[in-house]
Amino acid sequence: MELRTLRYFVAVAERGSVNAAAGVVHVTQPALSRQVRQLEHELGLALFERHGNRLTLTAAGAQFLPVVRDVIRRAEDALSAAEAFAAGRMVKLTIAAPTTTLTDVIAPFLATFGQEDPLPTVVEAAGTSVLNEGADLAIATRPPEASWERLDLAVLPLWAYVPAGHPWSSRASVALEELVGEPLVVLDRPFRPRQILEDALSAAGLGEPECIECSNPQVAQALAAAGRGVAVVSDDARFGLHGLRIEGAQGPLRISLFAAWSSGHHAAPGLAAIAARLREFCAERYGADVAP
């Protein structure tokens, strides 16, 4: 049983057809079909149920899939470790972070990397579960579990964005009580800025404001620029919008960033150093007052 064959199995399982998976793994459809059938023969069990061109996992296949993913991840970790040992430093780095953090913080930070830094890859994901799936460093908006190493990176403001010409466009801040009197453009509930806003409204005993929901923070700002409402997000300003800090009953509304990694990672000291650099970068980019 080869790792290559296991990767083929995962590709077919994720895409539901040999034809779709063949384009991803760059193998012809007949060759991929043979590899999958050979794997089933080696294992002595059926991994897929075939319905014309569509494939669905059998019960055994569904149980086997996470095991295979774990094997592939461990193999990739071993290869990464070997490359790092041979080079005497970390060669590759996978960073996972939420959308806004990737765009406004991680991408500008990676632009400062030099030739001696690891080659970075980014993954759009929230939380620290990605550390179990191959990511080296996770940037989260909630405190990581105690099982992970952690560094507090920054505490950034939540912004209320208004277009030029809005009555608030010359102000630096807005009270939460004023904000709820305006139509708001907010992110869907799974997003951390929305949760922070709702927690602040609840703590202040304020009702639910009129809201337009969307699933992308840049779209939220675009809607604010189009005059549809005040966008409440944590992004950097776009479309010429003016940002106001939001003052709640317990102070300004803010969102925290944390770096997390495994203490057992082969390059744990290097990850700690990169996290420390990222913390310094946040302070340089947004000002010393964002330090945790």
Image (cartoon, rainbow, N blue to C red):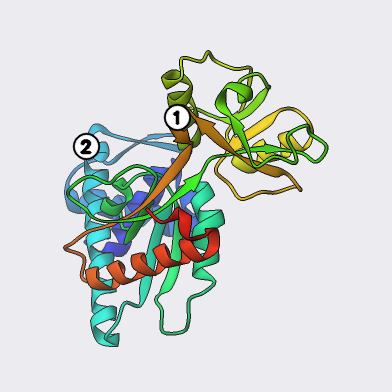
Percent position of residue 281, x then y: 47, 66
In front of the other: 197 or 45? 197
Residue 267 image label? none
The residue depicted at 48 percent of the width and 21 percent of the height is 201
Residue that mark 2 sits on: 60
The residue depicted at 23 percent of the width and 82 percent of the height is 85
Q: Nearer the viewer, mark 1 or mark 2?
A: 1
Percent position of residue 184, x then y: 64, 26
The residue depicted at 75 percent of the width and 47 percent of the height is 239
The residue depicted at 83 percent of the width and 37 percent of the height is 165
- Within 10 Å of disc 1 (Cα), the crowding (few <14, some 14-19, many 20+) is some
- For the N terminus, which image quadrant? bottom left
Q: Is residue 232 above or below residue 209?
A: below
Q: Secondary structure at mark 1?
A: helix
In front of the other: 267 or 252? 252
| Residue 152 location, quadrant | bottom left
| Residue 117 location, quadrant | bottom left
Percent position of residue 191, x then y: 48, 35
Q: Secondary structure at mark 2?
A: helix
Q: Are marks 1 and 2 in contact (CB under 8 Å)?
A: no
* Residue 29 is at least partly visible in this image: no
- Within 10 Å of disc 2 (Cα), the crowding (few <14, some 14-19, many 20+) is few
What amino acid is found at the position of numbered circle 1 in the picture? Gln
Percent position of residue 222, x then y: 72, 39
What amino acid is found at the position of numbered circle 2 in the picture? Ala
- Mark toward the start of the polypeptide (1 vs 2): 2
Residue that mark 1 sits on: 195
Total numbered labels placed on residues in the image: 2
Q: Is residue 209 above or below residue 235?
A: above
User: Would you say 187 lies left or right of 25 here?
Assistant: right
In front of the other: 135 or 255? 255
